[in-house]
Amino acid sequence: MRVLRFFARILFGLVFLVSGWLKILDPMGTGLIVSAYFNAAHLGFLSVISIPVGVGLSVLELLLGISVLTGIQLRRMASVVFILMLFFTGLSLVLYIFDPIPDCGCFGEAFTLANAQTFWKNVVLLLAAFVIFLHRKRYRILAPAVAEWSFLGFYLLLALTVSIAALIWTSWVDYGVFRPGTSVLERMEAARQHQPTYQTVFVYEKDGQQQEFALDQLPDSTWTFVDSQTRQLGTARPLFDFPLTDRWGNYQAKALLSENDVLFTAVLYRPQSKGVGYWEKLVALRKDVLQKGGDLYVLLAGTQQQAEELSIRYGIPSDHFLFSDYKTLISLSRSNGGIVYWHEAVVVKKWSDQRIATLRMNLQELLEEDAEIIAASGGITQQLICEGIILITFLSLVLMRYICGILYDDRRRYKYLRRLATRRIGN
C-alpha cells in the first residue's frame, strides 16, 4: 500500500507540474483554449475573461502538482485534488461523447490529445487522486505549516511573474500552428489534400432484405427505395488555414507568401490600442526592410475604414493592409503589434512590439544569416526554456523535500527526546 501511495503521488504530481508549466509559459494560447470551451458551452460572452481564467487554472494546477509531489499541505490539498479530478473527468466524458472541440488543451498547445485519450487519462488521474485522498492522513507532514504555506506562496509568485511577463512581452514558448520553422503553404496544401470526403449511399429493399447502392449502381424498378445516407470516407484531420483577405474580400494568403521571399508582417489584433509611437517605429522598420529588398505588410483584425485611416496617416500603402480574425492573428503572434519574419513562406522568427527598435538595429545581420538556422535555433531555445524550467522546478522540489524532511524530523525527534527526559526526571 505504501508503494501504491508513492506511485499515485508521483504520477499525479508530475502530470500536473508539467501541464501547469506548459500553459503558464504561454498564457495567450491558454486563453484561446479557455475561450473555445466558453464558445462550446454557448458562453461566448465570457471570452473576455478567458486569459485570466486560463492563467488562474494553470497556476492552480501547478500548485496542486507541487503540493502532491512534495507533500506540502497534502492533507488539505487531497480533497481539492479529488474534487477537481471528479469535475475534469466528468467534463472529459462530455467531450468524449459530444465532441464539441477537437482537443482538450490539457497540455496547452504542446501536446494534442483526442477526446477519448483525454477521458482515459483523466480516469487514471482520478484513481490516483482517490488513492491520495483515501490515504491523505498517512502522508507525513513535511515542515511547519508556516513554512509549507511560504513554499507554496513562493511558487505562486514565480508562476504569476512568468505569466505576467509573457503577457507584457510575448510567450516564452510557441507550440502553436505558426511556430517557427512552419512552412505555412505546405500545411495549407496538406490540409486541403486531407479534407474529408463523403459518399452518399442509397438503401433499397427487395423480398424483405435491404441493400446499399452507390449513385452509379442503382438497382432496377423491382427494388423499393428506403433511405439515403451520407457517410464520411477516411479519417478527418484538424483543418489548417491562414485566412487573409484584402479590402475587397479577396483571399490573399497564398499570393502573399508565394510572391515575397523575404517578408515581415506586423500583427495587430487590437489596433486601436496602438498609439503614434508604435506606428512611427513600424514605418521606420518598413523603410529599412524595403531598402534590404524585402516587404512589410500589416495584418489587421479591424475594419477597412481603420486601414484607410492608418494608411493616410502613416503613409503605408492601403494594399499592404490585410485582414484576418482575432484567433488567427493571436495564434500567429502572441504580442499585439508584434513582428513576424517569413522566408519563402516559412515562419522564421517573432518579436514583441517592444523590440522593434532592436530588430531594426540587427536587421542587416538577420537577413544575412541562414533562415533555416535561425528558425531551428529559436525552436531549440524555446525547448530548452520549457524543459529547463520544468526540470529546475522538479529538482528544487526534491532538494526542498529532502532538506525539510531532515530538519523537521530532527526537530520532532529532539522534542520527543526532551519530553521523554522530562518525564523521567519527574519520576
Image: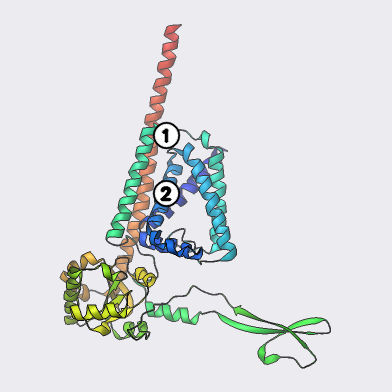
> Residue 292: x percent and y percent?
18, 80
Front-most of residues 165 and 117? 165
Under tag 2, what secondary structure?
Answer: helix
Q: Position of residue 303 (x, y in %)?
A: 32, 77
Taking the spot 39% from the left edge, 38% from the top edge, the residue there is 401
Lateral position of residue 310 relative to residue 180, left or right: left
- The residue that disc 2 covers is 60
Relative to residue 61, is residue 5 depicted above or below? above
Q: Residue at x 38, y 25 (%)?
A: 411
State whether residue 254 appears in this view: yes
Q: Quadrant of residue 370?
A: bottom left
Q: Residues within 10 Å of mark 2 (few under 14, many from 20)?
A: some
Q: Is residue 374 visible?
A: no
Please name the residue that numbered disc 1 is placed on.
142
Q: Secondary structure at mark 1?
A: loop
Q: Which residue sits at x=41%, y=55%?
A: 53
- For the N terminus, the quadrant is top right
- Extreme residue in the bottom direction: 220
Amino acid, disc 2: Leu
- Is 12 located above or below residue 302 in the figure? above
Place of residue 319 in the rendered image (x, y in percent of width and height, measured from the top left): 27, 85
Q: Nearer the viewer, residue 47 or 152?
A: 47
